[in-house]
Amino acid sequence: ISDYETDPEAARACANALRAREVRTGGSVLSREAHDYQIESGPDGIAAEATDRWYRCLLSETRIETIEGDEAARTLRKEERSYSTDGFFNLLQLDEWGAIDPVTGNNLGNDERRTVWTYAAPTDPDSPRVGYPASVTVMTPTDPTPHSSRRFYYDDLPLGQVDAGQLS
């Protein structure tokens, strides 16, 4: 992982990525967005030539703040999303945070959500089959009890395995 703040080559990978914006809609609604990125790079190691290096710009966090009404009587909704991925750039976890009290900054409760993905492993270790979800679970970050859970089976194989990638 490179830092686009200090690595000029990595900075070019994220040169066109949206970092922040502010949008006013409908007169009394203001929305601010900020996005953070992580940069994957490769190949690593002393033997890697500079011309062989590659960089990928991956969204790692989004923060959205929406203010409705005038400053004195405003209501505030703040959303934050944090992402984590695996070595194949599959989404592993998405944390979503919601409404806050505009005066205290405290969280207003029951609108947080965590979604966790697991992926099926190919039956052939040399197979290019990656990115097939085995399960998707939605829960509250403070309580691991699932609100919903889906499992995916492929090619009449046990859960967590994939061959041709056909849902069964």
Image (cartoon, grey):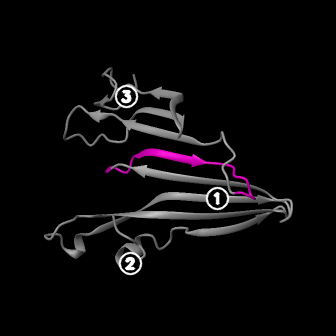
| Element under disc 1 | strand
Residue at the (60%, 69%) spot, across then down: 20
Which residue is drawn at the image coordinates 43% and 50% (left, top)? 84
| Of callouts 1 and 3, the N-terminal one | 1
Residue 31 shows which numbered tag?
none
Which residue lies most toward the front here?
104
What residue is pinned by disc 2? 6
Range covered by the magenta-colored residues: 87-104
Looking at the rendering, which quadrant does residue 30 occupy?
A: bottom right
Location of the C terminus (image quadrant): top left
Nearer to us in this view, 103 or 52: 103
Q: Counting residues from the N terminus, which is met first, the one under dot 2 or under dot 1?
A: 2
| Residue 10, magenta (yes or no) | no
Based on the picture, tell me whether residue 102 belongs to the magenta stretch: yes
Q: From the viewer's perspective, tell me whether residue 157 is left or right of residue 96.
A: left
CA–CA distance between discs 1 and 3?
A: 37 Å
> Which label was assigned to residue 64?
1
Q: Secondary structure at mark 2?
A: loop
Residue at the image point whose x is 23% and y is 70% from the top: 52
Residue pointed to by mark 3: 166
Q: Residues within 10 Å of mark 2 (few under 14, many from 20)?
A: few
Residue 64: where, in percent of width, then height? 64, 58
Q: Residues within 10 Å of mark 1 (few under 14, many from 20)?
A: some
Say whether residue 141 is left or right of residue 122.
right
Residue 63 locus on image (x, y percent)? 59, 59
Q: Quadrant of the N terminus?
A: bottom left
- Give the CA distance from mark 3 to mark 2: 44 Å
Image coordinates of residue 73 in percent, x first then y, are: 86, 59
Q: Is the magenta region chiefly helix, strand or loop?
A: loop
